[in-house]
Image (cartoon, grey):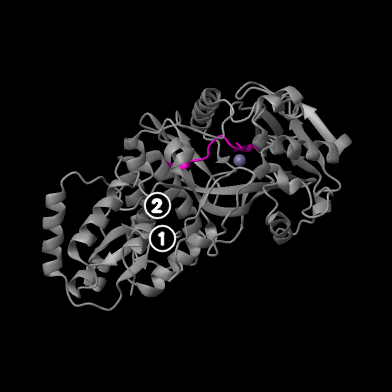
Amino acid sequence: MKKIFLLIISITSAATVATAQDKPSVFTCRIGEAEVSLLSEGQAGADISILIGATPEMLARYAPDSVIPNAVNAFLIRLPDKTIVVDAGFGLRLEDNLRQCGVRPEDVDVVLLTHMHGDHILGMMQKEEERIAFPRATVYLSKDEHDYWTSDEEMNRQPADRHSAFWNARRVITSYAHRVILFHTQETGKSATPLLPGIYGLAAYGHTPGHTMYLLESDGERLLIWGDLTHAMAVQMPHPEVAVVYDANPEQAVRARQATLDYVAEQGIPIAGMHIAWPGIGKVFRHGNGYFFAPQLDTAGIVGAVSRQLQRYPESRLTDIYKNFFQDYFGPGHLIKDTASVDRYLQQELASCGKCTGQWTESTGGEGRFYRVDLCVLKENRMDYRTFLNAFIESANYTVTPPPEAWIDTWNEIIRILDTMPLSIPDYAADKAALQSLLQSGHYAVHHSKAYEQRYKPHYRIISKALLERLITLP
Ligand SMILES: [Zn+2]
């Protein structure tokens, strides 16, 4: 059993990053003619102490472990005639990741920098030697960002322990010297002049004085790589008004975040971020007074999960596949207000559930964010009843239920992948249509199919993987 190690990191230049062993470090998707890859420098958790303006209620709801999923990412954009890197991370795995994509440092034509913090620019230099990492690249940097880091006045305004960040930035600027192109950022949503064909540099000042987002446009599709617009998606999506201690100007950073979220949700533009946990790319939807983030699906993960499910449960119908993915994305999918009835219902089901097969837990869907925990763990006294009940309630209450549009979008993408698979599932077309009309009516919860119920008699609850692994040693 793999354990999840949540290491607390600080995402300043001095930080170390823990790399999870169970994730690959490159994720690729297509935007028009462009191939965009996330190059992961590491997946880790950030401590809630980085947040400014988060209330205890927000933390209890959105960061119950006091740790927020986080990452350090760079991105690669491959266009038919150009190879572009967006930010260079710490440089921990950058070269390896590029090599996995078949790209050598000398193949990189352009580097776009969002800003000059260490976790975005240290990869611009080769480790031991003082040589530039991308010998042929032209570097794009906003003039406002450049002017800030090269100003002695600004540096001297900061305490001495922050001066190294200025020297790091200056080292990159002087090392790349005449290859650095300074530009004036443009306003999001206004008609803009591209920096390069299909690439726009947009102002999102606040995190740093010249913090820049890059909008990619290719063949009618778009992607906004928003740099450090967020550092704590779990909290800053529902509450964009929460800032972080790394923001140079927290109020300005909040305004930039709110305006950008509004824009991408309105326009349906997918986004990518440097501190968004794997896969670092997805879509933003309006949700209540805040926003909801639906991560980009991993095709291989979907195909693998469906194949596993059909192998194990050959009687599965499309509804059962739907249920598995729904549970994986959104957990139990509902808030629990009435604990007593949950208790009663669980006791009833426990009394009626049949013999145990020895299979206690099973990961959900493509990402395995949750476990289906068989009620056998209670029948066979593998787990204390109260612990189980509380874990289930906690999992339900700390899971954010998606806005319907987000789940419809995700499900349509799953169906698109399923349609390409050689599946022979009875009633596939009819179930597909039935699910479509269910979603159109604003509902999304389904029961297992009759065939599945009869054959497998499922008795389980959905419990967060991280939570369960902390509570018990799984058999
Ligand atoms: Zn950063």
Tag shown at residue 329:
2
Instruction: Give the secondary structure at mark 1.
Output: loop
x, y percent for residue 370:
37, 59
Circle number at residue 466? none
Disc 2 or 1, which lies upstream in sequence? 2
Q: Residue 55 location, x and y as percent? A: 36, 33
Residue count near mark 1 (Cα–Cα under 10 Å), binned few <14, some 14–19, many ≥20 = many
Identify residue for label 1. Answer: 365
Q: Quadrant of ligand 1?
A: top right
If the image is split into quadrants, where does the C terminus sit?
A: bottom left
Three-letter code for the amino acid on which mark 2 is drawn:
Tyr
Q: Which residues are magenta?
A: 220-234
For the residues bearing labels 2 and 1, Cβ distance under 8 angstroms: yes
Is 141 located above or below residue 91 in the figure?
above
Q: Amino acid at mark 1?
A: Gly
- Of the 4 image quadrants, the one containing the N terminus is bottom left
Residue 215 in view (yes/no): no
The percent coordinates of residue 385 (x first, y second) are 18, 64
Q: Can you say whether 57 is above or below 469 in the image?
A: above
Horizontal side of residue 197 vs 339, given as left or right: right
Q: Is residue 219 left or right of residue 126?
A: left
Q: Residue at x 40, y 46 (%)?
A: 66
| Residue 451 sits in quarter | bottom left
- Nearer to us in this view, 1 or 306: 1
Instruction: Give the farthest residue toward the front.
Output: 160
